[in-house]
């Protein structure tokens, strides 16, 4: 380490003799000390022996605190020339003792003063005698670098004689010095440590670090790098040779720059240097902040990022307020905010003790701001407002807005900067920045920096707001298209689930539906429009409406899918969709199903709990065009469950869909206390596998059936005398069912429907059926395909009154065509059981 005792100036050349830098460089011996994790010295270089007066044998294994200078202050009575050259200790930075104790996990540096004896114990030659004489007090510059990684070393300490540094560069204006070290024979592992110099000096560029390492390896002795431009943060100002007069000139120039005053001509160089350094520092800060915010389009996360980016580096307290509509993800009217505009406090970040601000200014509170406040001035002008110190009077005015809370102790005496968060000339909110009274007040440069910071943050917030707004629009559209399905239908119970996707565009085209059909039947449908976003959701809405319309016409499943495919072709060939359509007849105990490219449903048998995928003709997706669809009938028993879902539930990228279908069958067969619990079991089993990106629609129906004793049927002749027979049959059946309270209304309405059927029947068959379920259902069938129409009638009109009476007295009624004619039906609400 100390093979070069020569203190002459180096040529500044690296390996191969090429110039490495146009800067002064000196061969100043360095003391190198390595402290292990127990605080003991594990390496003590010859340079350390010369500088501190202790031989290696006496140093290794001893506590570092006993051997190294730990005092950072210079004695007040010291009037040596070196004190004038370096300036007084200004209290910046920690002392070496903090590094030796392991209190610091980052590099540090400083200056200390110590006395050395006339010669170290055990010195055997003049060459080993230190430079200073007996009892000489010397200034020492030191650098401490924590060592991270394997090995016993915890701290690397470098030290140099400050007088030697000053002597070599007397008259040379330098700002920072960067220590280096060289290979030597008495330090095991020096080569490896040399290669880690870029890690030890993280603030240096890779190029400079590599050059210093190369120079060390070539010269073979310690060096100190001097530069007017490089900034090494771990080497603070008090370790820099600087004349007192130059320091005073720079301080005067700095005050002028900070106050916005013209810099005197004789100080212009210093002022320009300081201003350039300050501007560069602010740009670095803004670039750093820009890299930390905007990592997500989530509005809440963006707000937190903006708040944390400025505390504590730029300010000590940051409170963020946003317009009420921005928080809600809504649009807001144009124009300047006024005293009625509500502002939500969405974040408060601070360096005070925990909880100090929480009760006084809680996050989530909404409030307006009066016109006399600096906040109102900021949000109406769109410009930053600077308050160097909040006076007692201003603190009282601000505190008056907070009902029953005294905010004055938190703000009075602090420096305040209010910056607007705006985008496209629209104020979205503002940030209130406060600095502790002990910290420098905000100045004009801070105001410019804060404005630029707010502009960047405002743009990021606006992007998040617009994304949130568009997402809310899409979700609202989709929610409006997803139906609210009754949990109970005649002969079946239904439960549904919908999960949005995890992609950026979370809105998709998955849907489910249930349509009430004549004859106590229920249509069950699940579909999936391929793609995501508003267009897919809109297409889904069109197809769902078409399915409901065609289902109400009681079209057979295969014919319904055929018509739906034709409709998709007319709408355009941009989108494809899969669809599974099933009709459950609880009286016949069967399912009638057709499939258009959809995954098959699962049927869980009530008898043995066995689940199976129904083998259906797959068919092509809706929108392909020109392909046939087939339907199948499946016998079911009361208590069986039908599970229909979209592929987003069972399909995971990189995994065979068969795995998901097997999991679906297994989870669907799991016993559950209710339909909702059964749906949740399926969701938990399939949604926790990871990798799901698509949205999910799930529909489960428990097929309860209708008991034979709850159905009564009569076949009537197309003769007017059959009307009286029909009325008597209805009256008698309701008596058997204990529904006497419905007898008059049901008899009247059934008579009207049978009268119309007999009068307009073209065939030989009229049928009457009563079904007792959740409601009382009455159906009349005839062989005429002409559907009756509700007409406006006058006092003298003889016909057209029957349907008007029907629509007035019935809970619901309707008509539908069937394969051989038509059915007209009505429902009556069952009386409550006592």
Image (cartoon, rainbow, N blue to C red):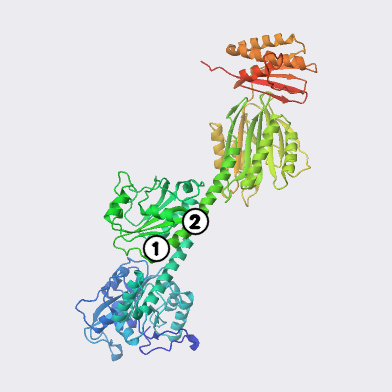
Residue at coordinates 69% horizontally, 43% vertically from top-left?
A: 577
Which residue is identified by label 1? 447
Is 37 situated above or below 560? Answer: below
Secondary structure under tag 1 reads helix
Q: Position of residue 187 (x, y in %)?
A: 39, 79
Determine if residue 403 is in view. Answer: yes
Residue 20 numbered mark, or none: none
Is 304 situated above or below 156? Answer: above
Residue at coordinates 54% horizontally, 34% vertically from top-left?
A: 676
Mark 2 surroundings: few (<14), some (14-19) or many (≥20) residues within 10 A:
few
- Depth check, mark 1 against mark 2: the one in front is 2
Which residue is identified by label 2? 425
Q: Out of 762 and 560, give the one closest to the viewer.
A: 762
Q: Position of residue 278 (x, y in %)?
A: 40, 71
3D distance between C-alphas at marks 1 and 2: 18 Å
Q: Residue furthest left?
A: 77
Is 718 situated above or below 229? Answer: above
Q: Position of residue 287 (x, y in %)?
A: 47, 65
Determine if residue 63 is in view. Answer: no
Lower position in the chain sequence, tag 1 or tag 2? 2
Q: Out of 433 and 223, give the one closest to the viewer.
A: 433
Q: Position of residue 20 (x, y in %)?
A: 47, 84
Q: Quadrant of residue 90?
A: bottom left
């Amino acid at each position: 380490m100390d093979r070069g005792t020569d203190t002459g100036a180096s040529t500044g050349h690296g390996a191969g003799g090429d110039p490495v830098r146009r800067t002064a460089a000196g061969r100043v011996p360095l003391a190198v000390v390595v402290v292990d994790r127990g605080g003991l010295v594990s390496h003590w270089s010859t340079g350390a022996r010369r500088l501190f007066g202790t031989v290696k044998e006496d140093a290794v294994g001893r506590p570092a605190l006993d051997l190294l200078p730990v005092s950072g202050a210079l004695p007040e009575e010291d009037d040596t020339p070196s004190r004038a050259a370096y300036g007084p200790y200004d209290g910046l930075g920690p002392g070496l003792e903090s590094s030796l104790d392991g209190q610091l996990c980052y590099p540090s540096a400083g200056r200390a003063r110590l006395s050395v004896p006339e010669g170290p114990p055990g010195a055997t030659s003049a060459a080993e005698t230190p430079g200073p004489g007996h009892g000489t007090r010397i200034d020492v510059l030191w650098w401490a670098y924590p060592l991270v990684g394997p090995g016993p070393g915890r701290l690397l300490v470098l030290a140099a004689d400050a007088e030697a540094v000053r002597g070599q560069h007397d008259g040379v204006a330098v700002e920072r010095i960067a220590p280096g070290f060289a290979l030597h024979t008495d330090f095991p592992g020096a080569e490896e440590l040399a290669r880690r110099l870029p890690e030890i000096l993280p603030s240096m560029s890779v190029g400079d670090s590599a050059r210093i390492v190369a120079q060390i390896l070539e010269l073979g002795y310690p060096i100190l790098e001097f530069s007017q431009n490089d900034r090494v943060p771990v080497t603070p100002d008090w370790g820099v040779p600087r004349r007192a007069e130059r320091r005073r000139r720079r301080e005067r120039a700095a005050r002028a720059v900070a106050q916005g005053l013209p810099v005197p001509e004789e100080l212009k160089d210093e002022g320009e240097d300081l201003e350039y350094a300050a501007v560069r520092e602010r740009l670095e800060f803004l670039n750093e902040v820009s890299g930390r915010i905007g990592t997500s389009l989530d509005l809440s996360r963006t707000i937190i990022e903006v708040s944390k980016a400025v505390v504590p580096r730029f300010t000590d307290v940051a409170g963020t307020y946003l317009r009420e509509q921005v928080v809600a993800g809504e649009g807001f009217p144009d124009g300047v905010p006024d005293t009625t505009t509500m502002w939500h406090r969405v974040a408060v970040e601070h360096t005070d003790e925990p909880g100090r601000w929480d009760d006084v200014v809680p996050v989530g509170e909404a409030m307006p701001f009066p016109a006399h406040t600096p906040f109102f001035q900021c949000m109406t002008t769109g410009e930053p407002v600077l308050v160097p110190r909040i006076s007692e009077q201003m603190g009282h005015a601000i505190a008056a807005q907070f009902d029953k809370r005294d905010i004055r102790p938190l703000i009075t005496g602090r420096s305040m900067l209010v910056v607007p968060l705006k985008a496209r000339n629209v104020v979205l909110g503002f940030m209130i920045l406060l600095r502790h009274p002990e910290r420098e007040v905000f100045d004009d440069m801070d105001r410019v920096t804060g404005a630029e910071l707010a502009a960047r943050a405002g743009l990021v917030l606006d992007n998040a707001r617009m994304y949130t707004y568009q997402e809310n629009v899409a979700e609202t559209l989709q929610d409006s298209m997803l139906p609210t399905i009754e949990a109970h239908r005649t002969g079946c119970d239904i439960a549904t689930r919908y999960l949005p996707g995890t992609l950026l565009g979370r809105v998709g085209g998955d849907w489910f539906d249930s349509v009430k059909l004549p004859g106590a039947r229920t249509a069950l449908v699940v579909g999936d429009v391929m793609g995501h976003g508003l267009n897919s959701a809109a297409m889904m809405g069109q197809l769902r409406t078409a399915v409901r319309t065609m289902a109400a016409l009681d079209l057979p499943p295969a014919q319904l899918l055929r018509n739906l495919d034709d409709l998709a072709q007319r709408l355009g060939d941009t989108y494809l969709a899969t669809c599974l359509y099933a009709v459950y007849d609880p009286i016949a105990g069967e399912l009638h199903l057709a499939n258009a490219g959809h995954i098959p449903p699962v049927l869980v048998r009530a008898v043995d709990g066995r689940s199976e995928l129904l083998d259906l003709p797959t068919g092509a997706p809706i929108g392909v065009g020109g392909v046939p669809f087939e339907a199948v009938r499946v016998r079911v028993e009361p208590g069986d469950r039908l599970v229909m879902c979209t592929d987003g539930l069972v399909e995971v990228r990189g995994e065979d869909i068969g795995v998901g279908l097997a999991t679906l069958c297994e989870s669907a067969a799991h016993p559950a206390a209710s339909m909702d619990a059964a749906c949740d079991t399926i969701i938990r089993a399939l949604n926790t596998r990871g990798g799901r990106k698509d949205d999910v629609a799930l529909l489960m129906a428990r097929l309860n059936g209708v008991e034979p004793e709850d159905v009564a049927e009569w076949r009537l002749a197309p003769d007017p005398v059959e009307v009286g027979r029909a009325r008597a049959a209805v009256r008698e059946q309701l008596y058997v069912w204990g529904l006497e309270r419905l007898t008059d209304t049901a008899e009247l309405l059934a008579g009207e429907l049978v009268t119309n059927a007999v009068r307009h029947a073209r065939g030989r068959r009229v049928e009457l059926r009563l079904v007792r379920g959740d409601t009382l259902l009455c159906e009349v069938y005839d062989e005429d395909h002409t559907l009756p129409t509700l007409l406006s009638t006058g006092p003298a009109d003889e016909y057209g009154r029957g349907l008007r009476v029907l629509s007035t007295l019935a809970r619901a009624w309707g008509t539908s065509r069937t394969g051989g004619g038509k059915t007209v039906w009505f429902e009556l609400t069952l009386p409550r059981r006592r």
